[in-house]
Amino acid sequence: MTNSKQYCEHCNIRWYYGHDPCDSKIKKEPVFIRIHLDGKRISTGRLGDDGSVMEIFPGFYVKHATVEEWKNKYMVEGAQVNTR
């Protein structure tokens, strides 16, 4: 008699009914965009799947409909946009 425990090849957790598709297969790394001016961070936002930006710095969490709307709020002359 064999022990037929089966483990997910993606997350190495014993799978059960309904485990496929595994959460780790569909999980994506978040994309952050930042605006810097003279080496100082002005704003940071997390890019959503629908093209929206969730502003996480400075202050409170604010959702902007588009990247352009977020940029219009914080972009000043000489500022740079960086992504990660």
Image (tube, rainbow, N blue to C red):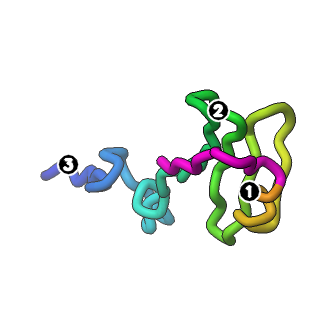
Q: Nearer the viewer, residue 5 or 40?
A: 40
Q: Residue at x 49, y 57 (%)?
A: 27
How far apart are the alpha carbons under marks 1 and 2?
Answer: 13 Å
Q: Do the residues labelled 1 and 2 touch (CB within 8 Å)?
A: no
Image height of 28 relative to 55, above or below: below
- Label 3 sits on a secondary structure element that is loop
Q: How many labels does the image show?
A: 3
Q: Which of marks 1 and 3 is in front?
A: 1
Horizontally, is 6 left or right of 84 in the view? left
Q: Name the residue under label 3.
A: 3
**Residue at the extreme left of the image, as rendered:** 1
Residue type (three-letter) at the residue carrying disc 1: Lys
Horizontally, is 76 left or right of 14 in the view? right
Residue type (three-letter) at the residue carrying disc 2: Arg
Mark 3 nearby-residue class (10 Å; few <14, some 14–19, many ≥20): few
- Label 2 sits on a secondary structure element that is strand
**Picture coordinates of residue 83 (x, y %)?**
51, 50
Mark 1 nearby-residue class (10 Å; few <14, some 14–19, many ≥20): some
**Picture coordinates of residue 57 (x, y %)?**
74, 35
How far apart are the alpha carbons under marks 1 and 3?
Answer: 57 Å
Residue 75 within the magenta-colored segment of the rendering? yes
Q: Which of marks 2 and 3 is in front?
A: 2
Q: What stretch is highlighted in magenta?
A: 73-84
Q: Mark 1 points at which residue?
A: 71
Q: Which residue is drawn at 29% across and 51% down?
A: 7
**Residue at the extreme bottom of the image, as rendered:** 50
Give the numbered dot on residue 41. Answer: 2
Q: Which of 38 and 13 is in front in this view?
A: 38
**Picture coordinates of residue 75 (x, y %)?**
74, 50
**Picture coordinates of residue 20 (x, y %)?**
43, 66
- Label 1 sits on a secondary structure element that is helix
How far apart are the alpha carbons under marks 2 and 3?
Answer: 55 Å
